[in-house]
Amino acid sequence: MAKFIRFCLLFMILTISSVVGDGDYAYDYYDAYAQAPASTSAVPAPLPASTSAVPAPPPASTSPVPAPPPAVVPALFAFGDSLIDSGNNNQLFSFAKANYLPYGIDVGGPTGRFSNGYTILDQIGVLLGLPLLPSYSEEFNVDTMRFGVNYASAAAGILDVTGFHFVERIPFSYQIKNFENTLVSLIKNMSAPIVKEAIPKCIFFVGMGNNDYLNNYIMPVYFTQDQYSPQKFAELLVHQYKTQLTKLYDLGARKFIITGIGQMGCIPSMLAETSGGGCSESVNEMVHPFNSKLRTMIIKLNKDLAGAHFIFLDMEYMFKDIFKNHKAYGFSVIDRGCCGLGKNQGEVTCLPFEIPCANRDEYLFWDAYHPTSAVNLLLGRMAFYNDANYSYPFNIQQLALI
């Protein structure tokens, strides 16, 4: 009976659920490369990759992202979910939105970021010397999008079905199609030779997989756990992920930052479900095979794809480090959200015009699912400068200078 009810609910939601993409292209990326003549327009070429050293790391702080130093890569293209979404879901018919206060309370108002301020992507972009990335949903502007675009969409996953209960979202496969559209637009405005030369020097940040667990495998309304063991599900995800990343490689990408999944069992929404209020180790153990297989896949891609450089951000290790040493990092509250309702402020996520905690820089979590801006800035610096325990086989600073 329980399975029948779940099936009925699944069927009803699927009838209204949709993914968002631009569909088929009458004029695609490969056509653009084949047909576009070299441009003589005055549109400047992307900034060349610098061989100068990246500035020394800033001290650990919770202050806003500083002004960018000189750019060390031409552009940064980002794909992911709500951890880095900067507004792509704002105009969608979706329940996964952060376009209202108190989101963005520390940066002048809501932008679509699921944070009180910045994301890890914002910090990495600035350390690369780039401006904050525009969302793909914004009207195309060559002057801003030549430095990169953010395609991330809250509730999106590696699997297209992931997050269907939020209705509209942009899965990774559709984000890749949107990137292809951007390439066509850049080629039309800047010429094929300029774009073709620049893309291999750009960095591609990809952070997927969180929702495939949080809003798919773990949720009872999906039948995924009935079909796959944690090991088999991880294999399914990594197989699909490899195909998608290879598509980006075929489109010219060569420098990749791939993030693992953090301590999902320790976010406020999971803490609220445990009897003792502690981390759900069963969830952490469920997610671990994905991280392990993803790291192995990245090692193989580095060997198999000529000229490719993939690095793996070990978010699981980074969050373990922050949890263990939270006082040293300046965090005093690690077991509840700053904005949310219910047990651990994690049963209901941050609601419109809810009054959040005042000491946000001392909190590890902003809402039921996402880190505070202070944690995001810290994670960005850890990934950019630190050793292979955080970023394997080398850090982002080293990737940029290749």
Image (cartoon, helix red, strand yellow):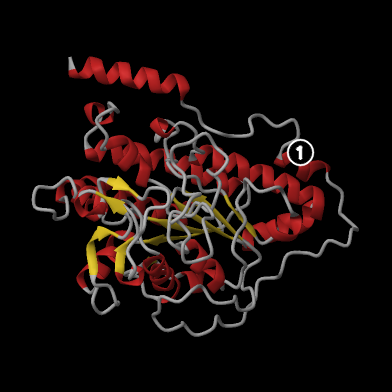
Quadrant of the image occupied by residue 126:
bottom right
Residue 54 vs 362, above or below: the answer is below
- Quarter of the picture containing the C terminus is bottom right
- Locate residue 211, reporting x and y percent: 37, 42
- The front one of 350 and 234 is 350
Q: Which residue is rendered at x = 19% and y = 50% of the image?
A: 343
| Label 1 neighbour load within 10 Å: few <14, some 14-19, many 20+ | few
Q: Quadrant of the N terminus?
A: top left
**Residue depicted at x 30% and y 28%:** 222
Regarding residue 184, the answer to whether it shows in the image is: yes
Relative depth, front residue between 56 and 29 = 56
Percent x, y of residue 4: 24, 14
Is 267 left or right of 176, judged from the image as shown?
left
Q: Nearer the viewer, residue 277 or 251?
A: 277
Extreme residue toward the left, this view: 276
Q: Which residue is drawn at 42% across and 22% down?
A: 14
